[in-house]
Image (cartoon, grey):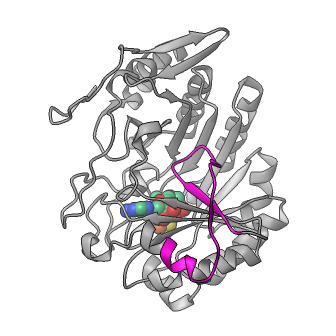
Amino acid sequence: MSTPASDAFPQRNTPNLSAKKHGENASLVDGFGRHVNYVRFSVTDRCDFRCVYCMSEQMTFLPRARILTLEELAALGRALVELGVRKIRLTGGEPLVRQNVLWLFRELGRLHECGLKELVLTTNGSQLGRLSAELKAAGVARLNISLDSLNPERFRRITRVGELKTVLRGIQAAQAAGFQRLKLNAVILKGRNHDEVTDLARFAIENGLDISYIEEMPLGIIGDHDRAEAYYSSDAIRADLAHAFTLIPTTETTGGPSRYYRIPGSETRIGFISPHSHNFCGDCNRVRVSAEGRLLLCLGQEHSVDLRHVLRAHPGNRERLKQAIAAAMAIKPHGHDFQLGSQPVILRHMSHTGG
Ligand code: SAM
Ligand code: SF4
């Protein structure tokens, strides 16, 4: 296990270091009493886009031997569900560019019989035209689709290589396949797309979608812009939206970090993911597995356990894997301490981490 010496562990409750039994059900509880029931897998660090806030233009990707195999990911999913995890999100990188990834969706979809409640996906939408129906059939419940601009040229500048029309067709294909309540994710950067927040909300309303606006997080060196200069707060976005819509705060949750508002007369939920302005760590219920199989206990800290080592040193030994995961709860830190300086403290990119 790696635990950076720099991290303080404020207000730790009675140590609750491992999987506890609650009646019949196991559960993962960290040292601060938070129940971990949601895991995000980065199934690949690769992507067909190069978004300016996520990657640098020239990325070096991991060699295949260093990333978890699909079988290892499936085994990990089963172990996690047996430990009480109820929601698994596949993300990346772009999960849908990984070869044979549908096999993994189908395997994880079978875990609904063992207690999994939601299998969900975050995607850039580029492959939804060809894969939506099969994802639905595999048991995927909901999709988050990234969309930062409705202007094709601007979309290209932000993603460096992406085509807006492919993503818009992907959204239509997902709706045609029967996905309900699709959610758009929009990272808002001052001077790049902050003037589009109202248009994006209108697009969501007109198409029966939810939307979450995300403050950029300082993960990895991107070599594109100064993150402090590009910072556009959730409060500023909300103020912009208030010129066009009435926003009613709600206590609704989709089990993630978004805080939601409703617009009267519309089904659309407007969410805000605000790591800088409204830290969401207090009720964190999540951990991540990086493409290399590192169990990351916090998005913004380096506390982690090498599950790839456990999987490869003890093939087929699920109890050993479960022990390693349960023991890792002891090092889940209280929260991130993102700073908006020009150099990120966390050098791993979001694509590697599993955003
Ligand atoms: N490729 C897929 C996509 O773009 O939806 C899934 C992976 S992507 C890393 C997951 C989410 O993280 C996307 O909504 C993306 O916009 C967001 N993201 C990436 N880098 C980010 C950063 N530095 N700060 C905030 N959000 C970021
Ligand atoms: Fe790829 Fe998603 Fe990162 Fe954009 S945000 S580069 S689509 S992984």
Q: Is residue 252 magenta?
A: yes
Relative side of 6 to 103, left or right: left
Provide residue 177's location: percent of width, then percent of height. Answer: 83, 61
Q: How many marks?
A: 0
Frontmost residue, 183 versus 198: 198
Residue sitting at 28 percent across and 70 percent down? 227
Residue sitting at 59 percent across and 45 percent down? 89
Q: Is residue 277 visible?
A: yes
Q: Is residue 186 magenta?
A: no
Residue at the left extreme of this rendering: 5
User: Is 280 above or below relative to 340?
Assistant: above
Provide residue 232's location: percent of width, then percent of height. Answer: 38, 73
Residue sitting at 20 percent across and 32 percent down? 8
Provide residue 62's location: percent of width, then percent of height. Answer: 36, 52
Q: Quadrant of residue 144?
A: bottom right
User: Is 319 above or below relative to 187?
Assistant: above
Highlighted magenta segment, given as a residue range: 238-263
Frontmost residue, 51 versus 150: 150
Q: Is residue 163 visible?
A: no
Q: Quadrant of the N terminus?
A: top left
Relative side of 255 to 2, left or right: right
Frontmost residue, 203 versus 252: 252
Q: Quadrant of residue 108?
A: top right
Q: Quadrant of residue 65?
A: top left
Residue sitting at 37 percent across and 69 percent down? 53
Relative side of 62 to 266, left or right: left
Provide residue 24's location: percent of width, then percent of height. Answer: 67, 10
User: Is 89 above or below relative to 116?
Assistant: below
